Each structure stands twice: as structure tokens, then as C-alpha cells.
Image: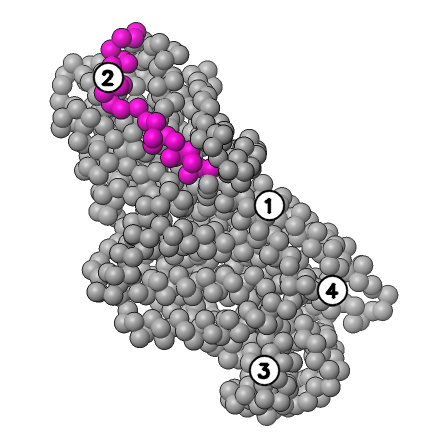
Amino acid sequence: MNSDPENGGCKGGGGDIARQIEVEADIDTAMSFTKTYQTPQREKVYSNWESMVLAYQSLGVVYGDLGTSPVNVFSATSFTNLSEDDLLGTLSLIIWTLTSLVLVKYVFIVLHANDHGEGGTFAIYSYICRHIHFNTKFTIHNTKLQPDSAMAYYTGGGHSPLSTRAKNFLERSSSAQNFLTVIVLLGTCMVIGDGALTPATCVLSALQGIQSRSSKITQDHVVWISVVLLVALFVFQRCGTSKVSFLFSPIMLIWFATNVSIGVYNIFKYDPSILKAVSPHYIVKFFMANGKTAWDLLGAVFLSITGAEAMFTDLGHFNKRAIQLGFSLVVYPSLIVTYAGETAYLVKHPENITDAYYSSLPNPVYWPMFVISTLAAVVASQSMISACFSIVKQSLALGCFPRVNIIHTSSNHQGQVYSPEINTILLILTVALVVGFKGGVELANAYGVVVIWVMMITTFLTSLVMLVIWKTNVVAVLGFLVPYVLMEGAFMTSLLRKIPQGGWVPFAISVLFMTVMMSWTYGRSKKTTYEAENKMSVTELDEALSSIYRTPGVCLFFTDLVHGLPPIIRRYIHHMNSVREIMVVVTIRTLPIKTVSAEERLHVGKLGRNGVYQCLIQFGYKDAEDIDGAKYTDHIAAKLLELTDDNSEKHKIRSSMQKGIEFVTGRTILKANKKSDMLSRFTIDYMYRFLQKNSMPAFSTVRTPSNATLQVGMLYEI
């Protein structure tokens, strides 16, 4: 079950016991769940050999998209009458783009801005939120308690005067917090959009090479072969990444090795001097000679680094050192040699630029390379599909995505997940893109347009980390921010011209997902505000319980409000006119950290004087929230017995446990009040309600006996 991430804390009353569960009070030391959970460790320290093995494995998961880029880049250009200087300038652009934006930025800088080994937009956002207290109502999560800073996976530290001023500004400014939230959601939506574009582009590009060998094979044939292959790929997702992952790394290693061999062959056969393009002065000459044409070419050159963002997103599957080794020792030199070989071939055969990669292949190895490139395209597709599943799981854990089914496909790796709903949506979008664009240049225009925005968001968030968390000198921060904003801004302006020619598609997909996520987050924040303003006080609870009949047994009432008692409990007591002798209000909270250790997972406290307790169960956004209600009841009861020294109270708890357990869940429906504006009414009454009706139940991960479960409903007019 996912908690409402806009809440934080818990409330109680009654002397020392009440202070135990006040919003910012100290909470009891958690009981151990070592029999149920394996205690997660902090980021593991790997030996050199282990890092090398992980670097090899990362080839098949992280670098599929980036590694297959040589198939697309030159064919996406619109050059005619190419000269050798034009080709040298293009190759120099590719080399220095790979070097500056991927090797320097991602490998040596961005990978360090991870959340205990986890990467991606949400991970870096959570990393920031551990150091900045977000108090705006519209935010991804606001569940921070004072004791959280002492937890194993929270980190802290001192601040320089500048970082302190920046931190204070962000904590005081709700507009800045809302801006951060929106760009994180936007970056996430764009990555999901890229997850639909990547399979379409990679598979089509790989299969189009067959047309150069047979005039009987039309573009329609290529399109429908691609559709069949893509449908099979998405259907196979339910088997889990682990079932096919053992094939990925060998395929990509063969892909890189053969490309290097062919690249070296082409360099020596066609133009050994092509390597002089490593000098950046050819870029200057190229722009001076071609002007706007060279500027337009930046959009095609950018395709050489699409997939670079997966290095950060997929970090949690491996480790920082493995990603760095894999790219620096294998991927980077392989790509440089492959592009150099293609360029050397084009110097002698510029007329073949529209099919540069396949045309540059020697005849004896054409068909083997066609098979290898098709398999590599499937690997590239798989990496982005898996990344989408992981991103959606993190979004669910932080409460900013409608609840969908998340299935863990591996008992050894928490990050390997599968979502049937997301898989179906990606399949529909991918097939629609393939059939709609039919593999034309419009698809290449669509591909990569949103990636540059994700990179710019990453640049901004990393700069914020450098300033607020790493306490980096402001000159160094500007030395990172300004050059990369200028470089990425140049690519962005070039890619903008592609919007009317197909580039609008990824933005449309992003807007679709952004609308869903914003509507859901807005509705959840409104629900939280209503519950906080209408929550039931402990004094009111004591008065209500003193005049009703107490049925023997235990009641576990699940609620997603962390601060206090939600109004639905008032409704339950009023209409039932009886409550079990022992009532435990259970809140499941997702923290903005990777994982919560077993010792810190569960806390209990007493509410009032009439056998009512509060239980807080905590998870990190990478933890599997699969809760067996019966087993957790035993753990909660054991913790309650530890809480009290009163023998009569202990006897009452034990006796009630033997007389039956009742599980109560709440279901709330939101309705906009008459004072709400038109946009708010539409968002609450239509968008949020539609998403709520078609999403998984709020407590779907809590497994309880159906004959002992009761659902209570309530209408919130907000």
C-alpha cells in the first residue's frame, strides 16, 4: 500500500504517553523484523573484481540505447553535397558531445549525486529533500519527522554560508518548492515518453537495413515486422527481466567488439587520417562554413548520446564504479571508433549517408551484423522499458502516480519489477508510433527531443546538490552549470525546429502523463489538507469511546494520514456505535529514502486512555510493500506488550488477540465545493475521481482475510 506522501508525523495526547507520538516527538525504538525481512545494508563496497563483473553486466542493461546510436545518427542528417571538411566537422561534434556531455558530466559528476546508490530524477529529488524541509501543500512528499534524521539511510552534514542561504530560501519559498516538484514530475514524464520512443526507433532502425539488400522488401514490410517483434517483446515482459538478462551482456559485448573491428577496417581502408577529427578546431571550421545548416545538424548529432540518461536512471541495478568502468573502458572507445569508421567510409561514398551504417558494412559480414544489430535493438528497447517500470514504482511510492499493479519479478533484486498496466500503455504507444510514422524521418525527429529536457533538468538538480549538499564553491558550481546549460541549450534550440516535423509527439506523451500525475498529486494534496483540518483530536476520541460499547477483540484501522486521526474514524465510531477493546490506527508511510532497515520499520504509541494505539509502518521507495495483515498483527501486538508495564493492560491485549481481529479500511471520495474555480472542479470531480476509480485500491498490498475486513466510505467536500 502507498501512503499519502503529502503528510508527515503523528499526533496524540495524554501526558508522557501523548508526547511519545506528537508530531516532532521521539518515537520508541523499533522492534526487529529479522524473521520477516532481511535487514538492508547501506551501499555495498565492491572489490575491483566485483566491479569489473558488474561493469560487464551493465553493458546489456544500461548501454543498449546509447550503444546502438551509430545506426541512427548519420541517416538522420539532411546534408547533400558533403565535403570532407563537413564530415570531419560532424565527427568532431560527435566525439566532443560524447566526451563533454556523457563522459565528463554523467560519468564523473552526475553519478555522484545518487541516493545511497540509487539514481534517477526521483532519487536526486529525494537526496535534496533529505536536506531541505518541504512544507508546501503541493509537493511529492512531506512526511518528514524529527527522528527521521537519525535513521540509517538519512544523511546530513554542515553547510557553508552560501549553501545555508540557498537552503533557507528554498525552505521559505513555496514557489521554489512547487517549481522543483513540477520539474521533477516533468522529467519523469519525459523519461516515460522516451520509454515508448526508444523501442519504436531502435527496432525500426535495425530492421530498415534489410531494404538495402532487397528491393522487394518495402517499408510496409519493415513496419509490420517491427510491430510483430515489438508485440512479442512487450508480451514477454511478464516473465521478468531476469529471464532474459543473461543474454543481454553477451549480445552487447559482441555488438561493441564487431563494431570496433569494422570501424578499424573502414578507417584503414578508406581514410586513416579521419582520426584528426579529435581536434575541436574542425567544429569551428564546420560552423563558420555552414552557419545555420551546421546549427540544424546539432539535432542529428544529439542522437549520438540518447540513452545517456539511462546511466543515471539504472544506477541502482549496479554501482557507480561499474557504470564508470563500463562506459570508460568499453562503450566510449567503441563508439568513437565506430563513428570514425562510418565517417571514413562516407568520405569515399558520401551519397550513402542516408543508410550510412549498413552501407559501411563489408559484404561478408552484412547478414551477421544485421542479426546482431536487431538483437542489440531489442536490448536497447528492454533497458528503457525496465527503466519505466522502476520509475513508475518510485512514483507510486512517493504518491504522485495513480496506483497500478507492481509485480516483483526477482526475489534477489528489488529493482526488477513489472507493471501490467504500464506495459500495456507502452505497447499501445510504441505500436502507434511505428504504424503512424512508418519509420520515416519524423520518427527520428520525435526521438531525442524530450531527452535534452531531461538532461537539462538533471543539470539543474545536480547544481542544486553541489550548492546545498556538497557545499561546493560557487565558482565551481557556476563552472558546471553555465557551460552545460549553454551546450544543452544549443542542442535544445536545434531540436525545437523538429517539433512541427514529428517532435511534437514526445511532448504530447509527456503532457498526457504530466496531466495524470499533476491531477493525482493535486487531488491527494487536497485530500491531505481536508483530513488535517478536520482530524479527530485525542480528547474527542476519549469522549466518544467513553459512551459506546467495546466489543471483545482487536481492530486494525488502516489510514494514510500520518498526522493525527482522520475524520473517517469519527464517522466509523458514530455509525458503528461500538469499537473493539483494542483499536490500533495503522499508518503506512513511504519515506524519501531508498530503504528502511528492519529495526526502524515499525513504531507504536498510545492514543488516549481507552485502549487505542497508533502504529507507524515505514518503507523506503525501493522497498517491497507486501504486507501480510495476520503476521503484522502479531508483530504489532508484541510491540504493544513492550510498550506498557501495566500487567492488566498486557492481559487485555493478549485476551483481545485471542477473541478475533477485524481489519478496517477507509475509502474517501472527493467533491469540489461551490467556491472552487472551474479548473479545480474539473480536476477534482472528473480527473482525480476517474483516476481513483480506475486505480488499484489504496490498501491493495495489505493482505487480510476477506471475512474479517470492513470498508468504510466517506465523502470529502473540499
Find residue 694 and report its image quarter. top right
Q: Position of residue 510 (x, y in %)?
A: 57, 53
Tag 3 or tag 4, which sits nearer the N-term?
A: 3
- Name the residue tied to disc 2: 542
Label at residue 440: 4
Q: Residues within 10 Å of mark 4 (few under 14, many from 20)?
A: some
- Name the residue tied to disc 3: 91
Main secondary-structure element of the magenta-colored stretch: helix
**Would you say 694 lies left or right of 72 here?**
left
Residue at disc 4, secondary structure:
loop
Residue at disc 2, secondary structure:
helix
Query: Looking at numbered disc 4 in the image, what kind of residue is underneath it?
Result: Gly
Q: How much space separates mark 4 and mark 2, taking CA atoms?
A: 70 Å
Q: How much space separates mark 3 and mark 2, taking CA atoms?
A: 76 Å
As drawn, 711 above or below 677: above
Give the mark toward the camera: 1 or 2.
2
Magenta stretch in the rendered image = 523-549
